[in-house]
Structure formats: C-alpha cells, structure tokens
Amino acid sequence: MALAHHYRILGLRTGASFEDVKLAYRNLARLYHPDLNPGNDQAKERFIQATQAYEALVAALPKVAVPRRSPQASVQSRPQASPQGSPQSSSRSQTQIPQPQIPKPAPAAETKLENTSTVQPVPGGSPVEQSLKATSFETLRHLLSHQRFPRAVALVEGLAQRFPEDPEVRQWHAITYYRWGHDLINQGNLKKAEACLKKAHRIDPHNKSLGQAIQQDFQRLAQLSQNSVA
C-alpha cells in the first residue's frame, strides 16, 4: 500500500516529517481510543487504521535522533553560580543528589505472553486464518516485550473482531489490557489504569489466574489513591 494512503489516514500531506507523524497519531489515538468510545465500532476501526498507518510510516521513514537541548534551554535551566563554600551552594549540591528508585512490581508471571510460544488452532478456522493468528501472536509478543501497549491494544482489538469465538484470543485481549493497566499504575496514571483493569476483567471474567492478578492491582491502585489524598 502506498505511503500516501497512510499519510492521508493520519490527516497529513505526503512527505510530512517523522515528528508530524507522531503528533498526528497521538492526537487520533486520543480521539478514537476504544476506552474512550465504548461500543463505537466506527471509532474502534478508525483507531486500528490510524495505528496501522503509523506503524507503516515508522517502518518506512528514516529514524530520527532525539534532539539535544538547545544552548538557550541549557542556560535557562542551569542554576546561577553561588560563591564556593557558601551555605546556598552547599544546599543546592545536596538537593541534586539522585534518589534511589524504588523497583516497580512486575506483572503476574502467568500474564507474560512473551514466555509462551504455542498457539492453539482457530476453532473451525482455515489455514489462512491459522497463519494470521500465529503471525499476529508473534507481533503481540514483540509489542508487549517492548511495552508498546497502545499498539498491542490495537492489534488485539482487531483480532477480537476477526476471531470473536476464539477463547485464546479472548485471553490475549484481556491480558493485554491488564498489562497496560499494570504499567499505567507504575507510571502513576491511576485513572486510566483503572479503566484498563476493568476492561480486562470484562473481557475474560472467568480467567481465575488473571482475575487474581487484576485484584492485586486494584488493591495497589486503592492504596496509591489513598496515599495521594493523604
């Protein structure tokens, strides 16, 4: 498919910069994300199309290095020098000592799809569907291992539409939302984390091991919410 088509999906002119592609995708993802448009199949389809277009453009465009800070920004952010040995200088040097980071809890082991290599056959599926499922699972494992959760969600949303009666796809669907919610808790985005965990439970409510992992994160979520209020 021509790159011009992917640019049009993101609302960009052909040849737009890598930064413009990222910004356009971020805006569309916020607008059409399934969590923000429950039951809206059209929004879900737009979200999937935008994600596929973004992935195609990222693969085709040259990698862009992270820009360095401008000299002006560096000067502005640099604190003014204080006389050596003054109390102010000593105080500032103490506040700049990095604090040790508290390790974040890892997701439940049974939700680590990266450790799974087998894929169950699609119930009543054709060889083409079997191949599609296996290929999609490899992509999903890669996305989860690199914590690319929005793209992983877009992938499993598409799989759930294609294979609505496949219990394994349903499990992947729920686990992906759980993994994203777990990561959002670690990032401090508690409201969005709660939405992801609730959706994970709705998708696969009879999965006991996943349910226990979700409950543990709900407890951690409640504790963090109380700490933020206190």
Image: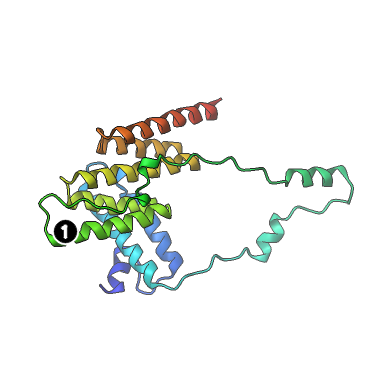
| Disc 1, SS | helix
Q: Quadrant of the C terminus?
A: top right
Q: Nearer the viewer, residue 60 or 216?
A: 216
- Point out residue 199 in the picture as x, y percentages from the top left corner: 30, 38
Q: Quadrant of residue 4?
A: bottom left
Residue located beneath label 1 in the image: 129
* Above or below 228: residue 132: below
- Point out residue 60 in the picture as x, y percentages from the top left corner: 37, 72
Q: Nearer the viewer, residue 28 or 191?
A: 191
**Is 39 displayed left or right of 226 in the figure?**
left
- Point out residue 218 in the picture as x, y percentages from the top left corner: 41, 30
**Is 20 displayed left or right of 34 in the figure?**
right
Q: Quadrant of residue 73?
A: bottom right
Which residue is drawn at the image coordinates 27% and 74% (left, top)?
2
* Above or below 58: residue 94: above
Which residue is drawn at the image coordinates 60% and 65% (left, top)?
68
Which residue is drawn at the image coordinates 72% and 46% (left, top)?
97
Q: Quadrant of the N terminus?
A: bottom left
- Point out residue 94 in the picture as x, y percentages from the top left corner: 77, 43
Q: How many marks?
A: 1
- Tell me how the rendering is colored: rainbow
Q: Amino acid at mark 1?
A: Glu
Q: Nearer the viewer, residue 86 or 181?
A: 181
Q: Is residue 37 visible?
A: no
